[in-house]
């Protein structure tokens, strides 16, 4: 009895798949490429932010003058801490130039400002802007991680339906009839998982790193606010 040779490798299965399954696979491949591109750019972004924050933080604590530090702040382009500092310093200058300014009676003639609520608002807003910038495009990773397996499952179901349809047409359940549909179904499942698993890993990794950066931002904001209150604001 002659055996029928059936080629069921992944590449041939994709080429022989129906248009619906091929479209499903194309969507999954596109999502996978997009996720890897986001992963690369986000990794570089967070790496640059972390390194720049370390440099700026060291400079901040060594500085004896906020004015001199402000003059250098634009050199720390990748530092989220520097951008928060710049926003708060600009707000302090506005307060100093406002009618709320009162001079202290000591010889240092150090300004004592009012309007601490404004400064706290700027700190909170600038911190939220930095966190939002770091979280940008992460929902794409989360969406791919959660929907990728289901998109692949759709291709799987469609491939199995195609196999049953061929069985009904031919009246035969031989391997030559069902193998192509089953093969393309399994490929859809595999590609769905291949797109979803890295997306979930990347998403969780970036969320963890962003939470760490958020803690650093909040700690810096609290320390900076205490320094400003102690030296420039009415008690």
Image (cartoon, rainbow, N blue to C red):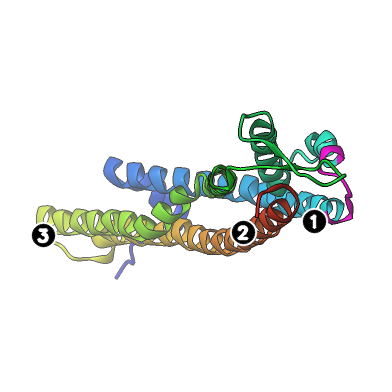
- Helix, strand or loop at label 1? It is helix
Q: Residue furthest bottom?
A: 1
Q: Does residue 70 appear to the left or right of 29 in the view shown?
A: right
User: Which one is earlier in the sequence, the residue at label 2 or at label 1?
Assistant: 1
- Helix, strand or loop at label 2? It is helix
Q: Are marks 2 and 1 in contact (CB under 8 Å)?
A: no
User: Which one is earlier in the sequence, the residue at label 2 or at label 3?
Assistant: 3
In magenta, the rendered stretch is 61-68
Q: Which label was assigned to residue 54?
A: 1
Q: Quadrant of residue 167?
A: bottom left
Asked if residue 180 shows in the view, the reply is no
Judge whether 128 appears above or below 197 on screen: above
User: Residue under circle 2?
Assistant: 218
- Looking at the rendered image, the disc whose residue lies closer to the viewer, 2 or 1, is 2
- Give 114 or 105, whichever is nearer the viewer: 105
- Give 2 or 92, whichever is nearer the viewer: 92
User: Residue under circle 3?
Assistant: 171
- Give 76 or 95, whichever is nearer the viewer: 95
| Label 3 – label 1 distance at C-alpha | 71 Å
In the image, what residue occupies the spot 31% across and 58% down?
150
In the image, what residue occupies the spot 33% across and 62% down?
4
- Looking at the rendered image, the disc whose residue lies closer to the viewer, 3 or 1, is 1
Asked if residue 86 shows in the view, the reply is yes
In the image, what residue occupies the spot 29% across and 40% down?
19
């Amino acid at each position: 009895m002659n055996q029928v040779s059936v080629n069921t490798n992944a590449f041939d299965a994709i080429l022989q798949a129906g248009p619906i399954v091929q479209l499903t696979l194309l969507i999954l491949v596109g999502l996978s490429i997009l996720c890897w591109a986001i992963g690369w750019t986000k990794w570089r972004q967070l790496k640059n932010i972390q390194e720049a924050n370390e440099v700026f933080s060291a400079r901040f604590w060594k500085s004896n003058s906020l004015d001199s530090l402000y003059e250098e702040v634009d050199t720390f382009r990748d530092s989220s801490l520097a951008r928060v500092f710049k926003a708060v310093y600009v707000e302090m200058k506005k307060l100093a130039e406002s009618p709320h300014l009162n001079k202290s009676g000591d010889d240092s003639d150090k300004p004592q400002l009012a309007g601490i609520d404004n400064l706290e608002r700027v700190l909170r807003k600038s911190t939220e802007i930095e966190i939002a910038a770091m979280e940008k495009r992460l929902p794409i990773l989360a969406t791919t991680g959660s929907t990728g397996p289901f998109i692949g499952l759709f291709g799987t179901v469609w491939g199995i339906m195609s196999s049953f349809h061929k069985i009904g047409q031919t009246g035969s359940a031989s391997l030559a009839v069902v193998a192509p549909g089953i093969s393309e179904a399994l490929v859809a499942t595999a590609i769905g998982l291949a797109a979803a698993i890295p997306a979930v890993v990347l998403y969780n990794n970036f969320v963890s790193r962003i939470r760490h950066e958020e803690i650093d931002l909040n700690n810096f904001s609290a320390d900076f606010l205490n320094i400003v209150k102690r030296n420039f604001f009415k008690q």
